[in-house]
Amino acid sequence: MNNVHLRKVGKIYAGGVEALRDIAFDIPDGAFCVLVGPSGCGKSTLLRMVAGLETITSGEISIGDRAVNDLDPSERDIAMVFQNYALYPHMSVYDNMAYGLRNRKTPKPEIEARVQEAARILEIGHLLDRKPRQLSGGQRQRVAMGRAIVRKPRVFLFDEPLSNLDAKLRIQMRVEIKKLQRTLGITSIYVTHDQLEAMTLADMLVVMNKGNIEQVGPPLQLYERPETVFVAGFIGAPPMNLIELPEGGVAGLALENRPVAPVIVGIRPEHFELAPVGTPAPLGISMQITAIEMVGAETYLYGALDGRGREVIVRVAGKAEQQIGERVTAVAERHNLHFFDPATGRRLAVS
Amino acid sequence: MEKRVTFNGRLLPYMLLAPQLLITLVFFYWPAGQAVWQSFLIEDAFGLSTQFVWFENYQILLSKPDYYRTLAITLTFSALVAFLSLSLALLLAVQADKHIKFASGYKTMLIWPYAVAPAIAGVLWLFMFQPSLGLVSHAIRALGVDWNPVLNPDHAFTLVVMAATWKKIAYNFLFFLAGLQAIPKSVIEASAIDGASPMRRFWTITFPLLSPTTFFLLVVNVVYVFFETFGIIDATTGGGPAKATQTLVYKVYHDGKLGADLGGSAAQSVILMLIVIGLTAIQFRYVEKKVQY
Amino acid sequence: MVQRRSLLDIVPHFILALGVIIIAFPVYIAFVASTWDAATISNGQMPLWPGPHFLENYYRTIFIGTAKTTREPVGIMMLNSFVMAMCIAIGKIAISLISAFAVVYFRFPFRMAAFWTIFITLMLPVEVRIYPTYKIVADLRLLDTYAGLTIPLIASATATLLFRQFFMTVPDELVEASRIDGAGPMKFFVDTLVPLSITSVAAMFVIQFIYGWNQYLWPLLITTSDNMQTIVIGIKKMIVTQDALTEWQIAMATAVLAMLPPVIVVVAMQKLFVKGLTETEK
């Protein structure tokens, strides 16, 4: 069973800076786990601690029910794909892939077979004699993946492997990584700051912020039921509208059964619907359009509540006939509303 | 600047450093310490007993006009060689930096004297200016000058300056060329658009931007004349005639070879050490300044 | 670049050509002298073109030597110079590579002290500690040996600094990838770091080979026996103040032979030479 357990894992750097606090979650065998969060949230540090490249200050990490805290990276039976690929520039593609196996005294025919197999899967068979500098960015990426595959490790670790590719290639490789991981069925941990990449790749999504875990779960669950304001704002593009309601409410926003205490109300742009003025609804807003973004299949209207105040984004299907400066009304259903405590940032159960 | 990723190892790094440290301690620090220690000692005429005398060796040394003469010769030598080889090298580098045909060919033809040993450079020039059979000597004699570097101190000094300058042009040329190529072309183009003539462009834009390189080379050239011209002098004039071409380093060598005055010789070495430290410190301040750019 | 009319290009061509001629002239004269007989040279009427004695003079120089002054064939001297230059270059590179590796890739007590100990040797050239160093080599009974000739010169702050500088530019991820691939520090050093440093090593080799070949003061002190002489020392001994004794055609052939190896190295490996020179001095 190649599952990964993290128990109360913490990291404090020599200077006293606390990078990670009480990180705990389990990754089941064969799952694709994505760590996502803004830069500096500790996701890469966590990955490198799993790899054994950073020491663990407190807590325990185990791979396949074996605690690995004190093991060297090479003893942990993991393989890693680096952001800059870290291919050995002076070795051929073949040698790059074979190096780790040779260090482990794998028999020669076995190395040959594994490298050829990986090359076949990744379609880089014709590149085996080349040096990394003779390859394109996408080809280097494949070689880095190949180096990981030949090792047949318990766990794959990916450290933002697609961030050095151009947008088109990134989408293509994203699909391939997902397919490959499915086929090989190897437990994977993948770090990215791109929430779209995270949503599309993950079986299990871990959202991190400032050294803490915000929420763990399947991507759709995080989208539909964010447990914190941070997750609500981080998952989804364009982001969820988060409007702080003080006790007295705000102008331009009408909410049925409004809680008495201050609250943050969240509503995704795609859950708004334009409606005539005065339409009764659980939530209604009135805003003046400040900008219009047409992306083809849909249009985003940017506006300010009642002409001033907070910015709100409303999604409209197809093209929009509205003009900048125009005043519109939008409504939303009760089950699409999210409520958060402004003090703690946590989700409120509001009936 | 430090590496983020390091290896663990208690003994290994010390083992890796051991050969280099052993050599520096045995052949650099120990003898340097010896020199300092000996400079405070005076040995009696028979080498039977020594006495600790604090700075007496230095007092004796610095009371001799001979030493100041050698110092003056060394400084004049440095100034002349630095000025001549820097200006000639700059002139050549500016030409070679222009987009002309064969630029890289000229470069190759100008840098190879770097590889010539100073002593060999001395021999080449000695041969040309040898009083009885030198080709150039004959030409000078034909002009009516009684040229004889073997007997005439000024002639000998001129010969040594020429040989030392010849040898250093290649090095200075290379650094000036690298400095010129590092100047953004857009700056030169901007000044051309501002209507500056090529001459004016050089003195108001190129030369000031080149000043870090010039300063660096100035220090290097002084160090070169102080320490590396030993071979040139030994091969051409042997410090003569009448010690007219004797530099500080040559004097240490020469006085020590006679072997009489250990303490005085050590004191000379220590003064030289202080000069190197001073010159190196100047160079560091330059490096620091450059880092700040 | 500011373009000019090509007519004006004559000026730089003229200046550069003049520079090349002046730079090359002494060497050309030396070469010409090495192809004439002693009589033609000593009467001061040597022509400006090569003479008929090229083979004869060089044969004598390499295999027999001068008749009156040094006696030793120059071939032996060249061999000595070559051994010295190679030992110094390879020695300096080897110990500097491992020192830089230790300083950059390990954390240990007295790391910076070790670094400064090496660094400060920049301020202690052999010229300022001539006789005490000579005495140590004498005490160690290394006079007139290759070891005495080379070992004291192979400590190198410049090479250590150059390699340190290069190692700092090697991406950390390569170390991490090596660790994951099961390579320890020495395996990383041999399999990855040294192969990556090959250009720096080659550049350093060019500079240090020339440095070693051109040594003068140190071999002058350390070698006394004729068969340990290097070519740069040998030529000086061929030239004596009594003109009658100096065989100029042999001395000049020796000068040409002494220049040949380092000049070939510089011209053939010009790119590496320029890299080595400009990077170590900064």
Image: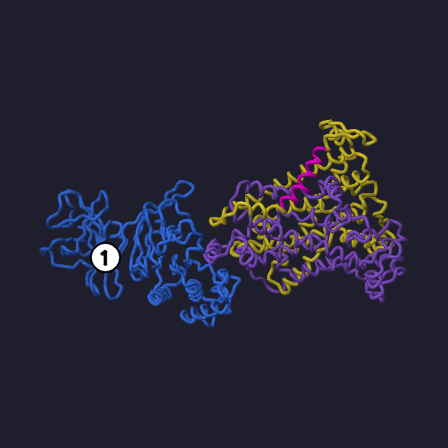
**Residue under numbered circle 1:** A221
Q: Colour of chain A?
A: blue
Tell me the element at label 1. helix
* Residue occupying the point 83% across, 61% down: C63
Decide if residue A146 is on the left or right side of residue C133.
left
Could you tell me residue C202's position as x and y percent? 62, 58
Decide if residue A236 is on the left or right side of residue B116.
left
* Amino acid identity at mark 1: Gln
Q: In this view, does C56 lie above or below A308?
A: below
Could you say which chain is coloured yellow in the image? Answer: B
Asked whether residue B193 appears in the rendered view, the answer is no
Q: Crowding near pointer 1: few (<14 within 10 Å), some, many (20+)?
A: few
Which secondary structure is most common in the magenta stretch?
helix
Could you tell me residue B86's position as x and y percent? 67, 49
The chain letter under disc 1 is A
Tell me which corner region of the image, top left, top right, bottom left or bottom right, holds residue B174. Answer: bottom right
Residue nearer the viewer, C182 or A317 = C182
Could you tell me residue A242's position as x and y percent? 22, 50
Q: Which colour scheme is used?
A: by chain
Q: Give the range drawn in magenta.
A: B20-37
